[in-house]
Amino acid sequence: MKLKTTIGLALLAAQLVMMTVARFHPMRYYSWAPFDALHAYTIHASLDGQPLSSEQIYRRYHLTAEGFNPRAIFQVTDTIAYVERVYHTAQQADVTVTYTLNGREQHPWQWPNH
C-alpha cells in the first residue's frame, strides 16, 4: 500500500474507535458520535451565602442559568468545575445544577462535590 492510503486508513480507523468509545463514555461531547440526548438544566449558584443572579452566573461560567445542551450534561458540569478549580480558587462557590435527560426525572449535581 502507498503511504497516503495507509495514513488515511489509520485516521479512519482511529475515528471509528473514538466514536465507538464515545457511545459508552459520559464525556462524549468531544467526539463525532451523534448527539441523541437533550439535557435541560438550571444553574443555582451562591458566593458566601449570597445567590448569584442569572447575569452573574453567565459572567462567571459563560453559561446561561437556564438552558438546553444537546450533548452530554458533563459539558456543563465540567465547565463549572473547571472555572471553580482554576479561576476562582480564592472564592468558595456553592453550585447546584438540576438537569433532566430528554424530559425525564430531574437529577442534581453539586459543586463542591461532597
Image (spheres, rainbow, N blue to C red):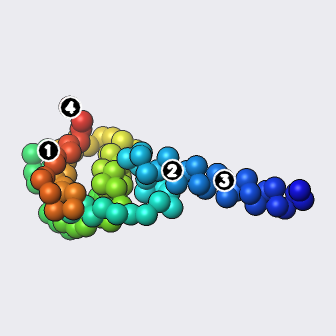
* Up-down relation of residue 37 to residue 85 (above or below): below
Q: Quadrant of the N terminus?
A: bottom right
Task: Give how far apart the Cα atoms at labels 4 and 3 are.
Answer: 40 Å
Residue 90, picture quadrant = top left
* Up-down relation of residue 72 to residue 69 (above or below): above
Inspect this view and state whether residue 44 appears. no
Residue displayed at 74% across by 57% down: 9
Residue displayed at 43% across by 57% down: 29
Residue 8, picture quadrant = bottom right
Residue 54 is situated, as x and y percent measured from the top left of the image, at 17, 66
Judge left or right: residue 17 versus residue 62. right
Question: Mark 2 or 4 closer to N-term?
Answer: 2
Location of mark 3 (residue): 13
Residue 85, picture quadrant = top left
Task: Give how far apart the Cα atoms at labels 1 and 3 are.
Answer: 50 Å
Q: Nearer the viewer, mark 2 or mark 1?
A: 2
Residue 74 is situated, as x and y percent measured from the top left of the image, at 33, 51
Location of mark 2 (residue): 20
SS class of the residue under badge 2?
A: helix
Question: Mark 3 or 2 closer to N-term?
Answer: 3
Q: Which residue type does callout 1 highlight?
A: Asp
Location of mark 4 (residue): 114
SS class of the residue under badge 1?
A: loop
Q: Which of marks 1 and 3 is in front?
A: 3
Question: Mark 1 or 3 closer to N-term?
Answer: 3
Question: Mark 4 or 3 closer to N-term?
Answer: 3
Q: Residues within 10 Å of mark 2 (few under 14, many from 20)?
A: some
Q: Which residue type does callout 3 highlight?
A: Ala
Q: In which quarter of the image is the C terminus?
A: top left
